Image (cartoon, helix red, strand yellow):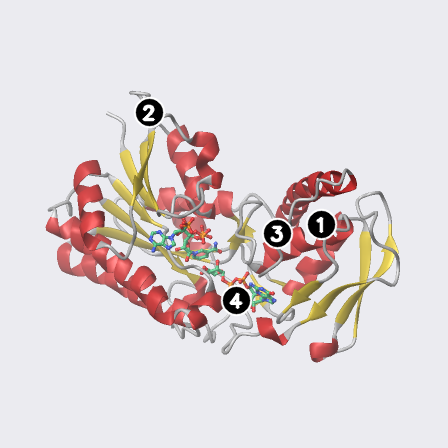
Amino acid sequence: MARTALITGVTGQDGSYLAELLLEKGYEVHGIKRRASLFNTQRVDHIYEDPHHAQRQFKLHYGDLTDSSNLTRILSEVQPDEVYNLGAQSHVAVSFEAPEYTADVDAMGTLRLLEAIRFLGLEGKTRFYQASTSELYGLVQETPQRETTPFHPRSPYAVAKLYAYWICVNYREAYGVYACNGILFNHESPRRGETFVTRKITRGLANIAQGLEQCLYMGNIDSLRDWGHAKDYVRMQWMMLQQDTPEDYVIATGVQHSVRDFITWSAAELGLTLEFRGTGVDEVAVVAEVTGTDAPALSPGDVVMRIDPRYFRPAEVDTLLGDPTKARERLGWEPEITAREMCAEMVAEDLKTARRHALLKTHGLALPVATEN
Ligand code: NDP
Ligand code: GDR
């Protein structure tokens, strides 16, 4: 019998890669998608199967982490061997604007799922993965951060995820639920949401290079992060649920870069050498040299990045660096893709899209390019 997995957040970056991985491993995969006024399944359309096909392995259910009756019904129908709770209001800056909703989805949503497992008597069958986060470390108490580093969350998102982390530990200790926290550091890919910093940069610069946008407006470019590739990280999510005993793991690369580095690399992929001039809110990035043919819209002297304080956060997480020793030693997990390689992949994908838009524009068929972020 094929094993059955249920993924919340299947339409997101990680959910889509995890669904692919589990299907490759022969699982029957169920995902929860939210009702939206537009199609919101772009990241999983390539694995979508016609519901009229009797043998399909990938099934979507309408649902929402704010609705316990719906979650209980889906769990009861699916009787999953593994639940991956990836669904969340996952944007840190947005959580300052929608703190109560973020808590409802990210904290209470986790509790609702764990309670449904208990209510349905699935403790002995269903293993539970919780998408915990390096944002728990916030104002860091120790570098690099490992499983034992104390937490100090710095946003409503991180505080909600702190509740989710501990309720998972609590259901493991109190009721014997096989529940694991993956404390994942930032991970990205060409499927990353457009308003997270890496994708904002790769997409924005590709558009600017093709003459579709004028300038990238950024917040704190001195911020330091430990960036990995989502494909490497979802592999680890699955590995965590295959162990004899449930445990929590830090997943990171152990290498740190600044947002400024990511801008420099992305520009280099487009044949642009940048110079950063000025300081603080007056800092700008100016094109010093253009090589190759990827940036026909740009010349030396053009300003491609400015600082907009709108993107500063009320409380910032300035630096994160993970220590993945436990994952490496216990599970043999190693990240295979470096941040620089990932950046090249993201720029290449965004450049393809920007070229298509630019071609349409030259034929008078311009499509609007969303820039609000
Ligand atoms: P995304 O933002 O790409 O995906 C989030 C998913 O959650 C989407 O499918 C979204 O649906 C869904 N969702 C949002 N609100 C609800 C709700 N009320 N009910 C049900 N589903 C909902 O996130 P990622 O894939 O990047 O991250 C996956 C998880 O891992 C998240 O929990 C995130 O907080 C956590 N995490 C991410 C890290 C990263 O660097 N990517 C690092 C550490 C943790 P829709 O498509 O309709 O918006
Ligand atoms: P983060 O990711 O907050 O770490 O959360 P994000 O990419 O949004 O920010 C990373 C850093 O870049 C700085 N920054 C900007 N960020 C955005 N989004 N837009 C900007 O214009 C900008 N300019 C500078 C930020 O201030 C921050 O320091 C991500 C999410 O995926 C969470 O769900 C996850 O839990 C953590 O990673 C680990």
Crowd tier of the residue under label 2, counting other residues whose Cα lies within 10 Å: few below 14, some 14–19, many 20 or above: few
Name the residue type under label 2. Answer: Arg
Residue 114 figure quarter: bottom left
Residue that mark 2 sits on: 56
**Residue 83 in picture, x, y percent from top left:** 28, 45
Residue 43 visible here? yes
Q: Which mark is residue 163?
A: none
Along the viewing direction, whichever of 227 and 280 lies nearer the viewer? 280
Q: Which mark is residue 206?
A: 1
**Residue 225 in picture, x, y percent from top left:** 56, 63
**Residue 218 in picture, x, y percent from top left:** 65, 67
Asked if residue 51 is positioned above or below residue 293 in the image, the reply reads above
Name the residue type under label 1. Answer: Ala
Is the residue indicated by label 4 positioned so its CB lies within 8 Å of ligand 2?
yes
Crowd tier of the residue under label 1, counting other residues whose Cα lies within 10 Å: few below 14, some 14–19, many 20 or above: many
Residue 99 figure quarter: bottom left
Return the disc, 3 or 2, that comes first in the chain's sequence.
2
Residue 306 figure quarter: bottom right
Is 310 positioned to the left or the right of 177 in the image? right
Residue that mark 3 sits on: 339
Residue 235 visible here? no
**Residue 77 in picture, x, y percent from top left:** 18, 37
Provide the secondary structure element on which disc 3 rests: helix
Is 199 positioned to the left or the right of 243 in the image? right
Crowd tier of the residue under label 4, counting other residues whose Cα lies within 10 Å: few below 14, some 14–19, many 20 or above: many
Name the residue type under label 4. Answer: Leu
Residue that mark 4 sits on: 320
Marks 1 and 2 sit apart, C-alpha to C-alpha, by: 38 Å
